[in-house]
């Protein structure tokens, strides 16, 4: 036991992240398989009120479980579930895991829909399987984090780092690392001209002032990482440090001097081998864009099939309420600032805008027919936009699109207004479920839209869909 502790404490086992990932992969596949089999037993026992006579898993059930296991092995790596999560939040890891598991479920539902085989399987089994598997998948990560945090908080499995910098920026970085003991990042020394700007609790650390001494210390003191935390003005020092460590196997991390710019919306990425800081970006990019596209097509198809009888009734009501076409076609601005024709059920007489021109609907607006007013207040006039989703012009969830004349008016007046066009426009959105719809504060609405763009996840989309059902369909600001 002492030997194992010594090995962990010295970090001999810390390089075996691949072994840990392999174990996690095996655990995930086992959870999906075992939960699928046990869920059948419990659901069958519940439906028959007895465990007597419950046979083994039928062949067609077992085939679905095996397909889910295969999909899990393929989908989870695409959602970077098995990357090194050291230093990341638990919630962030759970979100990635949940999105991956939801994608497995969506693909299985998609297959069942097109093969018309869904009726062959118990709904209670499917529900119990997916909920229990998610619970145990998340539980395994939480338990692992608890174990690793305990080890790191007690001095095990630490990474020893040197911070290059003794100024305010370096002090902020050092403070955050020291407060987060569960990350296991231990500051061994600092490199800089002096310690006069450091807080008292850092002044007892070794201060290295010479580049050659830094290289010798890194090689002799078993340093794992060097964090360069210097302002852009010290470019020469940064270059000297990198050159001095060129022959060392130590990991070098650069902390960009973004504090001075107070950037609220940024990320780090690499394009064609070139590291870049994204000052304005969308989380719906790359693989996430593919995931959201699949989500849109699957859910829009299902919703359209479910809503088709209601849409037929509404179309009849529109036709009887006033002469003219059933659908109202209107130019809107969507993804990348491109115009498209958005569909709605017509809620006003054909000539309603002849006198007023294009204006936002507001309280007291009497241009709508009685039936049209009902459609607006219940948001049922938006249902034809499901066709826009299937055409790829809109998404189920995203910022609401505006008419071109309003975009031209507000793009220079409202800060960050055009950033809402970084993603497809949505039938519903984060702003709408919080009441910011219709003739309300445009600044606040844009803030909500930007929050959605930067924090997108399947988890957030599911939340917005649920909130739309309970909050978004009928609202005081729907005129």
Image (tube, rainbow, N blue to C red):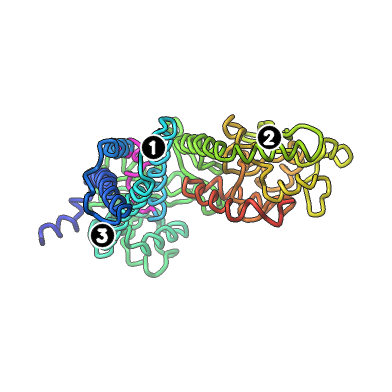
- CA distance for labels 2 and 3: 52 Å
Residue with the mark numbered 3: 147
Taking the magenta stretch, the answer to whether it contains residue 172 is: no
Label 2 vs 3, first from the N-terminus: 3
- Visible residue check, residue 141: no
Image position of 315 (left or right of 108): right
**Which of labels 2 and 1 is toward the front?**
1
**What's the residue at 84%, 40% (across, down)?**
352
Q: Residues within 10 Å of mark 3 (few under 14, many from 20)?
A: few
Across and down, in percent, residue 334 comes to 64, 36
Spatial CA span between label 2 and label 1? 31 Å
Q: Is residue 79 magenta?
A: yes
- Residue at 65% in and 49% down: 446
Q: Residue 166, how many percent across, how many down?
A: 41, 58
Query: Along the polypeptide, which appears first: circle 2 or circle 1?
Result: 1
Above or below: residue 328 compared with residue 126: above
Q: Which mark is residue 239?
A: none
Examine the rendered structure and indicate whether residue 323 appears above or below residue 366: above
| Residue 411 horizontal/vertical position (percent) | 71, 42
Tags 2 and 1 in contact by the CB under 8 Å rule? no
Rendered location of residue 403, percent (x, y):
73, 38
Magenta-colored span: 72-88
Q: Which residue is mark 1?
A: 108
Question: In whole angstroms, how far apart are the C-alphas of marks 1 and 3?
Answer: 34 Å
């Amino acid at each position: 036991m002492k030997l194992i502790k010594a090995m962990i404490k010295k970090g001999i086992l810390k390089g075996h992240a691949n072994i840990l990932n392999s174990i996690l992969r095996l655990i995930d596949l086992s959870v999906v398989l075992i939960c699928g089999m046990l869920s059948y037993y419990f659901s069958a026992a519940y439906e028959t009120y007895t465990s007597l006579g419950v046979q083994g898993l039928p062949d067609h059930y077992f085939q679905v479980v095996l397909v889910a296991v295969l999909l899990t092995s393929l989908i989870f790596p695409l959602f970077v579930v098995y990357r090194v999560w050291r230093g990341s939040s638990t919630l962030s890891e759970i979100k990635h895991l949940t999105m991956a598991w939801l994608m497995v479920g969506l693909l299985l539902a998609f297959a069942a829909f097109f093969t018309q085989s869904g009726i062959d399987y118990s709904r209670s089994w499917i529900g119990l399987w997916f909920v229990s598997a998610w619970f145990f998948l998340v539980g395994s990560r939480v338990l692992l984090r608890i174990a690793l945090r305990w080890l790191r908080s007690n001095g095990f499995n630490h990474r020893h780092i040197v911070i290059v910098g003794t100024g305010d920026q370096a002090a902020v970085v050092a403070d955050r690392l020291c407060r987060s003991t569960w990350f296991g990042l231990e500051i061994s020394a600092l490199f800089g001209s002096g310690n006069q700007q450091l807080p008292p609790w850092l002044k007892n650390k070794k201060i290295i002032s010479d580049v050659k001494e830094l290289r010798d210390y890194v090689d002799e003191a078993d340093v794992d990482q060097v964090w360069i935390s210097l302002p852009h003005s010290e470019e020469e020092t940064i270059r000297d440090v990198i050159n001095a460590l060129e022959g060392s196997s130590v990991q070098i991390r650069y902390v960009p001097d973004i504090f001075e710019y107070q950037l609220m919306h940024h990320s780090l990425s690499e394009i064609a081998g070139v590291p870049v800081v994204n000052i304005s970006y969308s989380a719906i990019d790359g693989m996430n864009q593919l995931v959201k596209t699949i989500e849109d097509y699957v859910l829009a198809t299902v919703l359209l099939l479910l809503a088709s009888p209601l849409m037929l009734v509404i179309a009849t009501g529109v036709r009887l309420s006033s002469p003219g076409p059933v659908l109202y076609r209107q130019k809107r601005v969507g993804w990348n600032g491109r115009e498209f024709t958005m569909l709605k059920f017509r809620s006003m007489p054909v000539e309603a805008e002849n006198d007023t021109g294009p204006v936002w609907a507001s309280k007291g607006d009497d241009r709508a027919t009685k039936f049209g007013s009902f459609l607006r207040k219940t948001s049922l006039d938006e249902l034809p936009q499901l066709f826009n989703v299937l055409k790829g012009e809109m998404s189920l969830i995203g910022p609401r699109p505006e008419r071109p004349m309003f975009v031209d008016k507000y793009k220079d007046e409202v800060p960050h207004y055009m950033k809402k066009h970084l993603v497809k426009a949505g039938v519903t959105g984060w702003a709408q479920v919080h009441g910011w719809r219709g003739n309300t504060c445009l600044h606040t609405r844009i803030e909500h839209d930007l929050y959605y763009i930067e924090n997108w996840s399947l988890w957030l989309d599911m939340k917005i869909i649920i909130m739309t059902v309970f909050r978004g369909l009928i609202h005081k600001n729907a005129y």
